[in-house]
Image: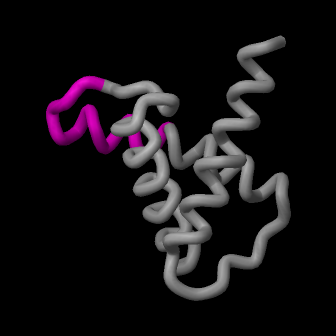
Amino acid sequence: MGQIISFIVVGLIVGILARFFYPGPVPMGMIGTILLGIAGSFVGGFLARLVGGKDPTPLQPAGLIGSVIGGIVLIFLVGLL
């Protein structure tokens, strides 16, 4: 149960940071922000593995940065649709 709560909290933090750094408005509620952060963590880990690095955890600084970048990429891709 603790892992689910930490997943949600990290997702919320990453989602808020991704929305903050994305230029322009990003209209979504709290649940959307949490889902954005969780999906951004997966995308950030995928991008890290794609480049050839190891998959950092979201609680490490490099993992947090990669997760935020993954969230920004997702906002951009959804905006294209």
Q: Quadrant of the C terminus?
A: bottom right
- Name the side, left or right, on which 67 lies relative to 16: left
Magenta range: 42-54
- Rendered residue at 38%/46% (across/down): 66
In-image side of 45 versus 6 (left or right):
left
Judging depth in this view, the residue of 21 and 81 nearest the camera is 21
Task: Please state the horizontal and vertical placement of residue 53, each as a whole percent of the image.
Answer: 19, 30
Assess whether residue 45 is covered by the magenta stretch. Answer: yes
Q: Look at the magenta stretch and give its main secondary structure.
A: helix
Residue 38 percent location from the top left of the image: 62, 41
The residue lying at 25 percent from left, 24 percent from top is 54
Q: Is residue 7 magenta?
A: no
Residue 26 vertical placement versus 71 (above, below): below
Q: Position of residue 67 (x, y in %)?
A: 46, 45
Q: Quadrant of the N terminus?
A: top right
List x then y, in percent, for residue 65: 40, 48
From this view, report whether residue 72 is shown above or below residue 57.
below
Residue farthest front in this picture: 61
Residue shown at 71% from the left, 26% from the top: 6
Q: Going 33% across and 26% down the picture, which residue do you hit? A: 55
